[in-house]
Amino acid sequence: MVTEFIGNGTTYKDKATGMWRSEVRFIDENGKKHKKVFSAKTSEESAQRAQAFRNQADPNSHYEDKVSVYFMFYIQNRLRLTNGDKSYMRIIATFRNQIEPVLGEIKMKDVTSETVQKLITDLYSKGYSESTLSKVRNLISGAFRYFSDNGGRCRYKDGLVILPLKCKEDKSPVFFNHDEIVTLNTYLRENLEKLRYYPALLILMNTGMRVGELAALKWENIDYENNILNVTSSASQASVDENGNFTHKIKNKDPKTKSGKRKILINQNTMAALNYLKERDSYLNSEYVVCTNHGKQVYQGSFNKAFHTLLEETGIEKDGRCGVHTCRHSFATELVNQKIDIEAVSYILGHSDTRTTINVYLHDKENRSLAALRNCEYLSA
């Protein structure tokens, strides 16, 4: 643990390697002197790394911080390094929505386990899910552990905070049955012109693509000669810059997993949607298969609005967890029900592991098992 820094440190260029190095000298709790070196390609970057270490290790720099200040320091300087944009945004949202309104004005040194337990209990009474309560506690625990490990003294003790006992949530995906799939495909095919993004829904229903993958799909990814759709990237509609600020600009990146880059056969429904889009939007000269009426890339929320309109118009009712991602769940479930090889289903969906496909899409295991046993001649004899 750092108890004192020696001087302001130095930054210099290593002539042998061409790298810039910034040195930080300090004394530990045993009075022993240490030197830590941070290397980078530029002097600015090496100096920034050295300063980040100073900020993290200085036992007095954050002692008087309020939760609102220190948690953001912890999130930006620690969690940002180990989380992608979407996960980072969820962490920010958890802090802003559940933690900061209650603990924000309290100093880190004054937060107690009782205060945090009351926060958790109040959230539970308001109906927050088990996963949300767990995220809140984990974020609080991580921030105080970081605070304590770097010399901060606090009254909060992690082991004293417990999560209320809740019934296990049903997290199985919502999906359409075979008849509903036929109804939706038929309605979409006959009403492609009714809503701008109905063709997009028809593609999602018949390819199992993730919404972000469709939003990033370009005409150059369509192989008409071989009836193949090439998934090569995925769109994220919000990202985080190097300072931790949100930018609501669509950004294309690699798919969710390495297996996300894949080829999907174009069936008749998908071809009908592609042909319609190509003709309807030809005057826009957009590189994207699905685009706005100005030829720009589509924000994914537009697909969701069209999806709920589709359910209203077809009279299909599902519970509140039903969203446009249900198209993917339904496509996968239909493949499984048609006895398509599970490895093939996993490939089509872009899963990196067949266990994901099995765990998520093999619904109604009890009835499947009983049916299999009834069909076994040996056991039914």
Image (cartoon, rainbow, N blue to C red):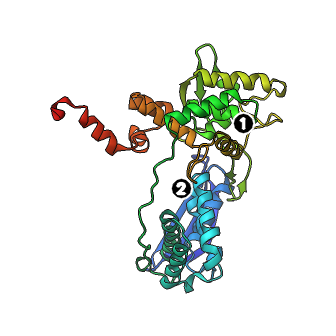
Q: Residue at x 51, y 46 (%)?
A: 174
Residue 271 at x, y percent in the picture: 64, 21
Tell me if mark 2 has few (under 14), some (14-19) or many (20+) residues whose alpha carbon lies within 10 angstroms of its own. few
According to the image, label 2 marks what residue? 82
Against 245, residue 175 (above or below) is above
Q: Secondary structure at mark 2?
A: loop
Q: Is residue 135 visible?
A: yes
The residue to which callout 1 is attached is 197
Q: Which quarter of the rendered picture does the C terminus lie within?
A: top left
Specify whether 97 is left or right of 358.
right
- The amino acid type of the residue labelled 2 equals Thr
Instruction: Mark 1: give few (<14), some (14-19) or many (20+) Cα within 10 Å.
Output: many
Judging depth in this view, the residue of 324 and 42 nearest the camera is 324
How many marks overall? Answer: 2
Identify whether 320 is placed above or below 356: below
Amino acid at dot 1 = Tyr
Q: Which label sits in the foreground, 2 or 1? A: 1
Q: Say if residue 208 shows up in the picture.
A: no
Observer-nearest residue: 263 or 268?
Answer: 268
Residue under the point 40% across and 77% down: 159
Earlier along the polypeptide chain: callout 2 or callout 1? 2
Viewer-nearest residue: 46 or 288: 288
Give the residue at the far top of this rendering.
225
Residue 375: which numbered mark, if any?
none
Along the line of sight, the residue nearer the viewer: 342 or 38 = 342
Residue 52 horizontal side relative to residue 192, left or right:
left
Spatial separation of the CA atoms under disc 2 and disc 1: 35 Å
Q: Residue at x 42, y 42 (%)?
A: 356
Q: Position of residue 299 (x, y in %)?
A: 72, 44
Where does residue 337 sit, x and y in percent of width and height?
42, 32
Q: Decide if residue 146 is on the left or right side of residue 354.
A: right
Q: What secondary structure is found at the residue carrying circle 1?
A: loop
